[in-house]
Structures are given as C-alpha cells and as structure tokens.
Amino acid sequence: MSVPPRAHAMNHETTTWFSDEERLLGEVRAARQRGGKPPVISGYDDLAELGRGGQGVVYRAVQRSTGQRVAIKVLLDGGLASESSRRRFEREIDLAARLRHPNIVRIYDSGESQDGRLFFVMEHLDGVSLAEHLRGLGDAATIPIDDILRLFIRIASAVNFAHQRGVIHRDLKPSNVRIDAAGEPHVLDFGLATLADESHGGAVWRTISSDHFVGSLPWTSPEQARGEGTNADTRTDVYALGVMLYQALTGRFPYPVEGPVRESLNHIIESTPLRPRALNRRIPDEVETILLKALAKEPPRRYQSAGEFAEDLRRYLEGQTILARPDTLRYRTVKFVRRNRLAVTAGSLVLASLIVGLGVSIWQAGVAQNHRTRAERRFEEARRFVRTLIFESDQFTRDLPGRTQVKELMVSQALPYLDLLTAESGGDPSLEVELASAYLKIGDLQGRPNTPNLGDTAGALASYGKALSIIHPHATEANPEARRVEAELRAGRADVLAWRGDLTEALDEARAANRIRAALSTRANPDLNDHVMLAFSHVRLGDLLGNPSFPNLGRSDEARQQYHQAESIIVPLERAQPQSFGVRRVLGVVHERLGTLLESAGRHAEAASHFTRSLEVRQALAAAFPEDINAVRDLAIALEKMGNVQSASGETEAAMTSYVEASRHFDALAANDPANMDARRTSAVHHEKIGNLRQFDGDVLGAVKSFEVALDGYRTVMERDPTSRQARQMFAIGCIKVGDALGHPAFPNAGKPEEARAHYLRALETFERLVQEDPDNPGRQRLLGLSQERVGTMHLLLGERAAARAMFEQSSRLRDELARRMTGDPEIQRDAAIAHQKLGEVLDEEGDLSESIRQLAEARDRFELLTARHPDNHQFRRDVAVVSGRLGDVLARQAALIADAADRTLHWRRAREAYARAQALWRRLEEADRLSDHDLAMAPRLAESVARCDAALADLVRASVEDDQ
C-alpha cells in the first residue's frame, strides 16, 4: 500500500494558505470546473458517490486489476483543504492501515487523485449502518436484547483490538459502524483517531464554545465536552460505546442532547443518565449495571478498556457474575468516604441513617399527594428507593469497614417500606417477583450460613416465609424467573434450618429446591446458570445428608451419590464453558466435597487429589476476581482442606503453611466486617486448626492462644444466635480445644488440669442439651462421647477415680452403640477404641488389672483393625503403639503378682509382645518423621520395658531349670 508523504508541519500552514493568493484562485477555479464530478483515480473505474461527511466523500468503485468492488474515501475540498485537514486524513490512513481485524474496515491503497485530492481505498461493505440495522429490529418491546449484546461484544472487541495497538478512535457512533449482509459489524472512519501515547500531549481536537462544537456531540464523553481533548484515552471510546448501546436498547440518549450546543454539553458533563430500565423494563438489571458503569462521568469509574466492556457483556450472556457494580448510592457518598476513612465505621451508620431518612421522605411525600399520577410516581420512587437499599447496598458498602452493620441498619429501616409496597402490590407479577427477591436478600443477610450474615436465623426464616407467600402464585412454568426465586428461597431455608439443627425439615426444603432446579434445567433453552444451580443444589443435598463439615444426617454414602451427580453436570459444562465463573466455582466446590468425604473415611491420598484440584481452580478464580468475597473465601477453604490432609499425613510444616494462609484470608474478611458472623466463625475455625498444629509441635502457649482466639469467635457467634444448635456445638468444641491445651495429658499442655476440666464440663453440659434436643444426630452423639471422655480424664488426673470410671463407662456405652450403627466411619470406630482404652486405664488405677487388661486388649485389637484398613493413616498406627505400651505395663504388673510360674510366664510373654509391638511402631513412625517431640520420649522407655520383660523371662527360665534339677 502506498501512503503519501507526511504533511507539512503546523507552523507552515499560514504560508501554504491564504498568503499565496495565486494558488488560492487556482484552486477555486479548479473546484468550479469539477463541480460534483467524482475524481479520476488511476486504477479505479465507475466511481459513484455513496455519502459524504465533514471531512471526506466516499465513493463506490471497481478496482480495474481485480474487478473487486471497493470504497474510496476522498478528502473533501481537494487543494482547498487546510494543512490540518490533510494531516488528519493522512493520520486516518496511517492508523487504519495498522489494524487487521475482521470487524474493522480494511485499507487497501492510498494516494492522490489526478486533481491533487488525497484518497484511500478500503473494503466495500454491502449492508447498512448500525443505526439502520437497529431500526429494523423493532421497538423497545420487541428488540432481541441478547442479540444486540452479542453484536456489541463484537464491536467492542474490534475497538479493543485497536486499543491494544495504541489507536483510540475518538469518534465512535452508529454511523461509523456498518453491518454487512451476514450481520457482522465493521468499525470505520478513523478520521479523528489518535495514538494513545500522543493523546496526552497533542492539541485539543474539539473546539467548544456556547454555539459551536466540532465532532459528534451525542456520543461525546464528559472529558471531551469539557474540552479536555488531551485527556482522551481508551475510556473515551468506552463511553461512546456505552451511549451507543444505551441508544440501541432504549431508543433514546441517556440525557437530552438535541437542544442548543451549550445546554447539551452541560447535560453530558453533569446530568446523571436516566436508568435504562425506566425506559425499557425488558432490560435486565445486570445489563443496566453494565451500561451505567460504561457511562460513568469520571473515567476511572468506567471500564478501563473496550475489552473489559465486552468481557462483562459476555459474562452476563454466559450467566456468570458480572464485574460491574451498581453505584447509585456510591455516587452520593464515595467522596465523603474516601476523605474520612478513619471515621467511616461510625460515620457510615449516620450516613446510612441519612439515606434511609431520604427514603422516608420520598414515601411520605407520595402518601401526601392526592393526585393519582403523582401518587403513582411516588410509589415508583419508593420502589426504587427500597430496591437501592436492598439490592445495591451490597456494592455501596463493599469497601466499607463494618459493611454488614451498615447493611443491617439500611435493611432494618427499609423493611417497613418493603412491607408497605407488598401490601400495595396489587398482584403485579413483576413487582411481586422483585419483592420476593428483596425478602430473599434480607433473609440471606439476616442469617444464611456460609454467606455474610448477622446471625439472626429466626429473622431469616421469617423473611423467607414472607417471600414464599408472595412468590407462590407466580412460580409457574410460564414464569421461570419466579421459579428461580422460589428455588433459592427453599435452598436458603434449608441452609438456615440445618444450622438451627432441624435437619429433617432442611432436607425436605433442599429436595424441593433441587426439584425446581431440575425442572428449570430441562425446559426449552435453559440458561447456563440453571444448569450450574442444579449442580449446586445436588451439592447442598450432599452436605445435608452426610458431610462432616456441615450439620448432617450421617448418611455419607447418599452424600457421595449427590456429589457425583453434581460432578456429572458440572464437568461437561466446564469443558464447554471453561471461562465461566459460576461453572468453575461449582467445580471447585464439588472436588472439595468429594475430598472431604474421603478425608473423613481416612483415605487421605485420594482426598488430597480432589483437594489439589479444588485448590487449583480456586487459586485461578481468586487471581482473576480478587475483590469477589466468594472467590477469596473459597480459596481459604481450599487451603484449609489441603492443610487437613497434610496434617493427617504428618506434613506438619506444609499444613501450618496452608492453615496460616487460609487464616490470613479469613481474618481479613472478619476484620473488615465484624458484624458478619460467617466471617467470624470461619476465622475462628482456622485459628483452631493452627492451634492443633502448634499443640502437636509442642508449642503449648501458642496452642492455648490460638484456641482461646477461636473460642472467643465461637462465643460471639453463639451469643448472636443462641437458638442455633450448630453455633452452640462449635462453641462446645472450642471449649474442648482450650481444655486440651490447658491440661490434657495426651497432649503437650500448660499443666492446668482444673481449668481444663472446667472447659470440658462446659462442653459436656452443652452437648447433653444438644443430644436431648436432637437425639438422632450421630455427629452430636459422638461429640458428647468425646466430652465425657475428656471430663473422665481430668477426674482421673485429679485423683477422682470413681468419678472418672463412671464417666468412661458412659462414654464407652455411647461410643460402642455408635460404632455398631456406623461401621464404615473410621473415626467413630476409633472413638470406640479410645473409650475402651480409657476405661482400661482407670481400671488399672483402681487395681482391677484383669479387667483393665481385657479393656486395653479390646482397644488394641480395634486400633489394629483400623490400621490394616487404612495403612496410610499414621494416627491409627500411633494409637496402636500407645495402647500396646500401656497394655504391656499392666500385663507386667499382673505378671509380677502371679504365683503360678506358667501363668506368670504367659503374662510376661504377652507383656513383651505388647512392648515390642509398640517399640516397632514408634521406630517406623520416627523413621517416617511422624513423631512430635512429646512422642519421641516414648522410645527409650519402651526399650527399657522390653529389656525388663526379657530379664523377667530369663529369670523364669533359670528358675524353671533349677526346679528341674
């Protein structure tokens, strides 16, 4: 392609122009002779005018050498064109020639016509302008919104291609986009384009005064309207794209731009765009959010590139979470917040009160009006106000410390007006679906577990109940959106009921939600999100049925089936939609849940495989969406799960690293939002995990500190919702952990048995009440048995043997019954073995050696069976070593008391076998680096015990020989 030489520099313009009178007259005479005739351009025939603009005329032509139809743009005015016009035309050629993209018009050639006019040749497009194309699609009631969004994704992607190569268009408008016969868009006319690195150093390219504007005013950005041409960048094009899409979806501009120039410029600079849904109710809320972000007055608040704009449109169409955030409230307050960050925690509550007060005034003003039209308008204003507080306050408060507390105030003040709107809804389906959605959001905030919540589960159930009564008449096959709301309400009720301990009713609700999701996913043309939510509903069913990380019914086999059902849905979706946030998030959840069941069954290597996959997925999501609370929380959970299997496999350093990193994320979430009980709970869980590892490593003071931090968190959650069985359970577990670190002899401890017993008794009292309230819950029965064992251990340590024996007998009866019912759960089998071990120890203390030996042998046999079934579980191997050593001690004492030589020999041999078994296991654990410093002290004692047995047996042999002689 030939490109003409660069034009003269700007400071030569005056000498090239009117100062040369002879040249000027010659150009005028030449222009008169040409009249309206097309120019003569070598190599091109049959020129016919297609259209003209402020800078040039476009002709259709045929390239002589190929017979190909082309379009030729010729600089207007020929030799009369100013030097700046010629330079701008040459710039258009230069910049457009850089861009080879299927949705950008291609430049083939350039040069000067025979009469000295600059031209360039480009591809000819059979089709219409974007404006004509949109007019052919119908009005706001019928336009295919998703098709328009797909079209704009391609337009924005083409503009982004130019941005990536440093080219800023600066004059995007519908007439500069043509749609070809195949429906493909093509961006053209780079006459006002510039290079990104020149946009901040060149001259202002638009002239603004009260009566004159150079450029395409309706699509102009605020910075252009203010005359800040030097500040034009990629975000300027984003603004124009936003205006174009707004116009495409509503048929109007965002603000008046058809009056006097100065008035129009003021609207562009100052007027808030009318919300698109006010003009076209068919526009989805998320699309409205995307549009308003693109139309932000301040460039930093827009999408930073056309690519980001296109990506958010694509995310919406794929059912993913969009990146844009509504900011109606933020517009009014963000500057105040940024100036007063230190005062925001308290001040934001006052701020929320002021905003709520504004809403009260709106409502009361509406009530006071007698005129029907004005009353209806006030009703709509109240509706928008409530929508803003409930739906948009998430984004308004996202960056504020104490966001949940602020939302609590906003929502509590909005609720009465929401109730009034409900009373006045008149059966309007659209309004009532919106109202039900609002109550759903409120219920989630009040008390839905595993989401930011205030710990008010009773309030959550009340809100969900209101929503269900509103949505029920509309939740038919003809109204899929209402059915989606009903499904989420059922799922929310299931979550809250499970947290409160009502597992049977929770399961009914979860199954109802699953049935609705299944029906939605099988209808004609289901959304991607319908499939994603169906998979997630199977996950939640599995959690309720048998996941030990959640309140559950102890039916782990059924839980596994539900997780595999979710896996069968989500894996094909991930192959088809590998970039979908929702799909990838559920994929990470499924792997985490399957890993948890394997971990619970002692199959740590298999669990680690699933946890690793979950971690990989979640690390990628958190990196891509670092501000998304769910993505960050999911990553922290994945790190915790990896820590669990690392700890069980003896990889204590790796486990500590995983737990500390998880805790860092959860602590940040809790610190930024102290009223969020979910964040407080999860932060406490991870301090407990860290305490476990510190205790294992012998860091007694560090363990006590971690467990006490965890207990404080659990106490806060329980006090916020004392009716929640799960909250009370976690508090009781926290008491056990603190007790272990203070005085339990099986752990490195602070040597404070009385303080430890006080914590254990508090746990025992809590679990006794919980089991009375929920007698069929095996998880709580197991924890009751644990608290009985811990209290018995402290009784024994403090010399109260009778009380210890009574407590151990209770624990043994309870745990044996659980083990008979749940044969496939290795941890419950281990609990039963420990109960026999503890009973054997107290019988030894009381001097009942024969019964002690029987109980300890029963414990050893159970531990040996677990070790055979789970050879990679070092904890089970350690259990065998500990109880074998204790059994050897009792057998040795019994042997010393037996008079019969044969019986005494048998007991010494059994004692030696027990000691030798313990010694061999300790050595294997030591070689594998699976022993704590506390454990390492056992090996020398066992060696001494084996030697003592050998000596006793040798003495018996010698005595036997002497007797024979």
Image (tube, helix red, strand yellow):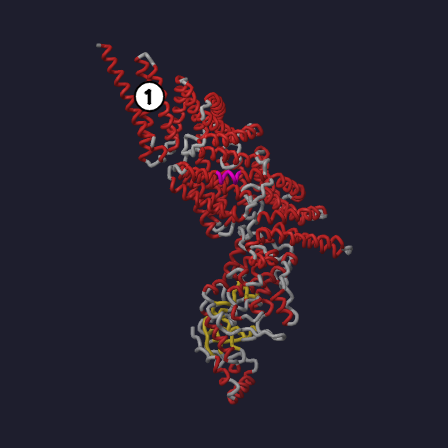
Query: Residue 303 at x, y = what percent?
Result: 53, 60
Q: Which residue is at a point 46% across and 40% down the rendered structure image?
A: 706
Task: Point out the image quarter for the N terminus.
Answer: bottom left
- Outermost residue, bottom side: 22
Q: Does any portion of residue 68 appear in the rendered image?
A: no
Residue at 61%, 56% (x, y): give it. 328
Q: Residues within 10 Å of mark 1 (few under 14, many from 20)?
A: many
Compared to 379, does 34 lie above or below? below
On screen, residue 919 versus residue 618, left or right, reads left
**Secondary structure at numbered mark 1:** helix
Identity of the residue drawn at 51% across and 56% down: 311
Seen from this angle, which residue lies furthest left?
Answer: 965
Please say if 327 is above or below 796.
Answer: below
Q: What segment carries the magenta color?
A: 708-714
Instruction: Identify the residue under disc 1.
Output: 911
Residue in view at x 67 percent, y 43 percent: 470
- The type of residue carrying mark 1 is Ala
Depth check: give the residue in front, 580 or 437: 437
Looking at the magenta stretch, what is its main secondary structure? helix
- Frontmost residue, 957 versus 445: 957
Q: Quadrant of residue 278?
A: bottom right
Q: Is residue 710 magenta?
A: yes
Q: Nearer the viewer, residue 255 or 532?
A: 255
